[in-house]
Amino acid sequence: MSPLGPWVPRDPAWLRVAWVAALGLGSVCIWVLFLVCSLWGRQPARPGAQPLAGKQSGGGRSQASSEKRRKKGAKQNPAPSRREQPQRARGPLHKEPRRASTRLAAQRQELMSAGRKEKPRMAEENSSGSSSSPSPGDTLPWNLAKHQRTQRTKSSSGSGTVLDPAERAVIRIADERDRVQKKTFTKWVNKHLIKHWRAEAQRHVSDMYEDLRDGHNLISLLEVLSGDTLPRERDLIRSVRPPREKGRMRFHKLQNVQIALDYLKHRQVKLVNIRNDDIADGNPKLTLGLIWTIILHFQISDIQVSGQSEDMTAKEKLLLWSQRMVEGYQGLRCDNFTTSWRDGRLFNAIIHHHKPMLIDMNKVYRQTNLENLDQAFTVAERDLGVTRLLDPEDVDVPQPDEKSIITYVSSLYDVMPRVPEVSVGIKANEQQLRWQEYREVVTALLQWIRNHTILFEERKVPASYEEIEVRGLAVWATRG
């Protein structure tokens, strides 16, 4: 047994208290030592204090040697007289203003000479800049040289953005195009969302940039267009979180949008620089680009026209179909999907080609552009079931939006009957011969029907059973 055993505390609580007390006492001692050392080092020497006894002899010898050196230096450099002292003290003070004025004059001359050299150089730059300055139509940022773009960027960053008329016109046209596309695509999305087989998915999109951010409307749209059922985010992680969670966090939105994008990639739809965070953040340009990609794949890519070539795009096929529909109408040409449709005559001609009783073409040639457009859109919606995706004031502009018109014309294509394709081996004269043969057969059939109708009208049918028996016996007797 250890001799210090009775002195060792056996309670662990006392050990902890003793350890804390030792730490506190040690820290206090360290701080006290630090303060004493700092005060001792900063204590100044008293002016009247005598040196220590042990150092008096050494201090006296040092003072005597310093005094001898001072006297020796005074003999070599005698002190100036009273008359010389004011002159020495006054000389530099009187010379200093002259030096300062000389320096100012030199600086002024340097600035003047630099200004004379700068003026010719600036004149040369201005003349060269004016000679190589772009024309008013070439002042867009992508038409300027690199140094001109840099200079414009610096000037705009220093004093606000300054745009020339050409740039402002381009921005205004782009904004107007995006506005029309947003309106058209929103109506197109709502037209398909209302067809969803589940009531909870039949939603209405008011602002496409905002209402597509959570991904639910996007998934519902793809379900209607494809006929497939896509999983939603709450279906994927229902086992992880409670069912009452509706998934309104950013992570849930990104997951839903990613499901839609993955499905499009599975359908071999090419998406260029479109990510889930772009749609979840409501990026206008990329949201419009995504909807246009969906329209191209699910509505326009299936267009088939007789006489089409294998290398034709969906847009070219739709243009060929439009040209076939308006062929034969006086003064109508379909060259593009912009200015050719501005007057509204092509819309009315397509409807008239399908159902002539709906449109009076003589009236169309006399009406204004807005009247023709309103008539075509109204008749197509009322009698053909085509959603009114466009407004007359959006089409009757100098440069109508191409994508919006393509979307509406493709909707007209969907309700029109398909023209049967002609086999490759049949020529135009053979078709004419077959039509002539068909007319002859039909004419003969109609003539036969008329003759037999008159014959049956002249015959008298017996009114009773007895008359039938009497006529039968008479016929039997004549034959016998």
Image (tube, rainbow, N blue to C red):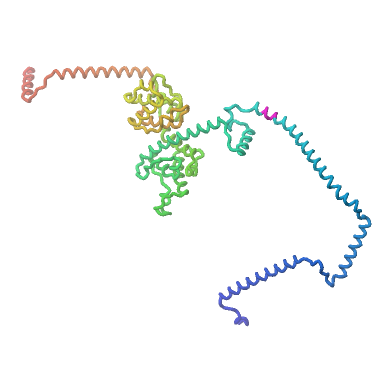
Compared with residue 465, is residue 9 higher up or lower down, i.e. above or below? below
Q: Is residue 287 visible?
A: yes
Identified at 84% across, 45% down, the residue is 94
Q: Position of residue 425 (x, y in %)?
A: 39, 22
Q: Is residue 20 magenta?
A: no
Q: Position of residue 303 (x, y in %)?
A: 41, 30
Q: Specify start and end residues of the magenta stretch as a single range.
A: 123-128
Total numbered labels placed on residues in the image: 0
Q: Is residue 307 visible?
A: no
The image quadrant of residue 185 is: top left
Q: Position of residue 391 (x, y in %)?
A: 41, 31
Residue 453 as seen in the image, left or right of residue 249: left
Compared with residue 455, is residue 22 higher up or lower down, i.e. above or below? below
Residue 101 as seen in the image, left or right of residue 66: left
Identified at 77% across, 39% down, the residue is 107
Compared with residue 181, is residue 97 higher up or lower down, i.e. above or below? below
Taking depth in this image into account, of 230 and 95 the one nearest to the observer is 95
Q: Position of residue 338 (x, y in %)?
A: 46, 27
